[in-house]
Amino acid sequence: MESSQYLDELSKCVRCGSCKAFCPTYEEDSTESMSARGRLALLWALSSGQITSSHILNDRIFGCMLCGKCEGLCPLAVDIKEVIYHGRTLLKKKDNQRKYLRFFTKLFIKKPGLTFKLLSAIHPVLFPYLLKKGTLPFRIELPERHLKDRPQVFTVTKKRGRVAVFTGCVVNFLYPHLGEALINVLLRLGYEIVLPANEVCCGMPLRTLGLEEEAVNLAKRNIETFKRLNVEAVLSLCPSCTLALKTEYPKLIGEGIDKAKDISSFFIDKIDPSRFTPSSDSRNAIYHDPCHLKYGLGIEREPREIIEKIGINLIRTEGDRCCGFAGLFCLSFMELSRQLLNKCTEEYTKAGGEVIITSCPGCIMQLSNEIKDKPVIHLIEAIEEALFQEK
Ligand code: SF4
Ligand code: SF4
């Protein structure tokens, strides 16, 4: 966002407070500066020279989860997330609390394969140490190998269509089995699949840390890689990646990937219930809405319809809960993140059922470290299981 546009957006805010209604950080800490209105007021004060960068200011601006729950509530359509992103670029130089996070995120994004190898070698010692020190919020298991290290094309004999997969860092490096599940389902349904080698991180983690220029470079590289592919959709298992490619890139670099799609909006009209048999272990499920899917991409109905089409009963839950993950937020604001997670855990434990289904690998990471009475799985795993189940 250009500086002039940033100031225009900030000056549009009339301080009505509608955006405070469902803000998860404000629900946990009802001080004004923990809401969108408060954050915008602080950024306005910063831009007009009334205040300067400080520990508490950084804490408030970097303490927004960028979940997007506030955006649809603003009567003046203030682009709250973009304003927060821009505010962070102004504050990053003096934001010492997250300097190591910036360093490691940049390192990982520059050399992902090498960082994965290094972490694989040292994580048996490093992760327990960080957990003990309280700098890692939960246990992370690294898989033996990641999903993709070369371009791959999967072909089928009776071709129904051709799609590309935007793997995303979490699926590629932490949950390759989810990527494999997507490949299995697509092939069974007759889709040829392209996994281009030059995919890079979507850039969202960098933007959340105020590293806009670095994010611009990644966005341009992804556009270059995906725009020339002859495919009907670019599918991702991570709603944050889809949100970045489809709706944030046009604001960031003036061009996005229109064909980027969450798997539920792709599969919704391709699921023939007669081909699916749910596992007897997961007949009743809770569905957890990822914030970027529901509020960013407006997708709420499709995953639920798919779950019911494949023969699983959905259990109604009371709230509309954020799990508290929010990417790097859970590392930077551990206590707040845990408070939000605890509320989810309490509700989902009370609700019963045999499984929790969600559509985001980040939500899986957060929820599965706390919820032990039932597995937390990705929608693609539920689809795969029901598609490959013996009749
Ligand atoms: S994006 Fe989410 S956390 Fe941030 S101000 Fe809006 S509702 Fe609150
Ligand atoms: S809803 Fe919009 S106009 Fe009202 S306080 Fe929030 S950002 Fe400002």
Image (cartoon, helix red, strand yellow):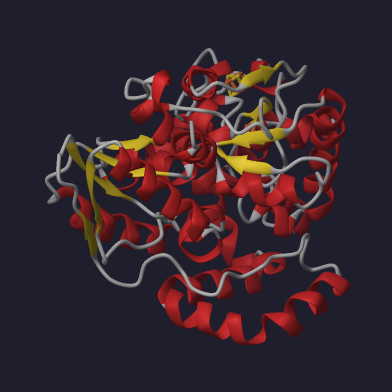
Specify the quadrant that holds the N terminus. Answer: top left
Residue 184: percent from the left, percent from the top? 37, 48
Q: Is residue 360 visible?
A: yes
Residue 99: percent from the left, percent from the top? 64, 71
Write down the quadrant of residue 249 in the picture.
top left
Asked if 100 appears above or below 336 in the picture, the reply is: below
Task: Judge left or right: residue 208 versus residue 215.
Answer: right
Task: Judge left or right: residue 308 versus residue 39.
Answer: left
Of 255 and 317, nearer the camera is 317
Of 249 and 112, nearer the camera is 112
* Residue positioned 32% across, 55% down in the render: 219
Write down the quadrant of residue 70 in the picture.
top right
Q: Where does ligand 2 appear, by image quarter?
A: top right
Of 316 and 328, nearer the camera is 316
* Residue positioned 27% across, 56% down in the render: 222
Write down the quadrant of residue 247 in the picture.
top left
Task: Judge left or right: residue 324 versus residue 302.
Answer: right
